[in-house]
Amino acid sequence: MSNKTPKKAKGREFKPREPYTHRLRKILEDYPDGSQVLREILQNSDDAKSTEQIFILDHNTYPKDNLFEPDLDNYKRTDLKLDRYQGPALLAKNNTIFEERDFQSLLKLADSEKRDQYDKIGVMGVGFNSIYHITDSPSFITGDKYVILDPHEWYFNGGVEFDFVDEKLYDEYPNQFAPFRIPCDKSFKGTIFRYPLRTDDDSIDSDISKKIYKPDEILAMFQKF
C-alpha cells in the first residue's frame, strides 16, 4: 500500500431536518430491549423481500488506522474518533439491496412528527430504531453503497452515503471496511448491517441510551430468539 496521504472520502449527506437523539430515546421506551431487537431486524428483512437473514456476533477488535476522517468540527472539540467503533459488533446480513425509497425511509424515521406516521414509512419501519438499544452508530453496505448513520452528529451531518466501489475507498481505507468481513472492492449482492456494541465510554457520551452491551449479552439474545 502506498505511503501517500489518502484522498478524503466524500459522500452524500442526508441530514434530517432536526436532531433526533431525543426522538430515539422516546422510541426506545416503546420498543422492548433484548431479543425483540433481533425480531425487528428480521421483520425489516422480511418486509424487504429477503429470502435469508444471517446474524453474526463478532468479538473482534479491528485496527484503528486507515479510517475515514470525520467531516464535522465536533470530533476535534470532543476528541471523538471513529476508531471507537472498531470493537465487537452485531452483524445482520440479508440478500436484498437497498432501493432509493429505503434510503428515504431512513430520513423519515427521524423527520416524522406524528407517531401514527411511523407505520407508513416503508421497509425501514420505526422498529429499525430499536437497534439503538445496543449501538449509537449503525452502518451498512448495500450494493455499491456504504452508509454511516450518526444521529449525534459527532462525525458526519446526521448520516452519509459513499459510493465505495466507484471511489475505490477500500484501497485507501481498508480498516474502515475490514469489520464487515466481506470483500469490499466490489459491489455486495445484498445488505450487511453492522451495529458496534455500546461500550462504557460510549455510554458516557450517548444521548440515546446509557445501556452498555457486552458480547455475552448479544449471545443471550440469540439463545432467547
Image: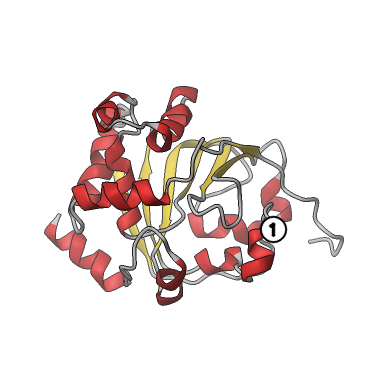
Left/right placement of residue 88 relative to residue 57 reads right
The relative height of residue 73 versus residue 92 in the rendered view (above or below) is below
Residue occupying the far right of the picture: 4
User: 52 or 87: which is nearer to us?
Assistant: 87
Left/right placement of residue 72 relative to residue 34 reads right
User: 90 or 189: which is nearer to us?
Assistant: 90
Name the image quarter holding residue 66.
Answer: bottom right
Q: Can you identify the residue that label 1 sits on?
A: 73
The relative height of residue 71 versus residue 190 in the rendered view (above or below) is below
Q: Residue at x 42, y 33 (%)?
A: 111
Does any portion of residue 144 appear in the rendered image?
Answer: yes
Residue 103, percent from left and from top: 47, 31
User: Mark 1: few, some, or many residues within 10 Å (few <14, many ≥20)?
Assistant: few
Does any portion of residue 52 appear in the rendered image?
Answer: no
User: 119 or 96: which is nearer to us?
Assistant: 119
Q: What element carries label 1?
A: loop
User: 152 or 101: which is nearer to us?
Assistant: 152
The relative height of residue 83 versus residue 17 in the rendered view (above or below) is below
Question: Which image quarter is the N terminus in?
Answer: bottom right
Q: Residue at x 80, y 51 (%)?
A: 7
Residue 130, percent from left and from top: 28, 49
User: Given the image, on which type of amino acid does mark 1 rest?
Assistant: Asp
Name the image quarter holding residue 77.
Answer: bottom right
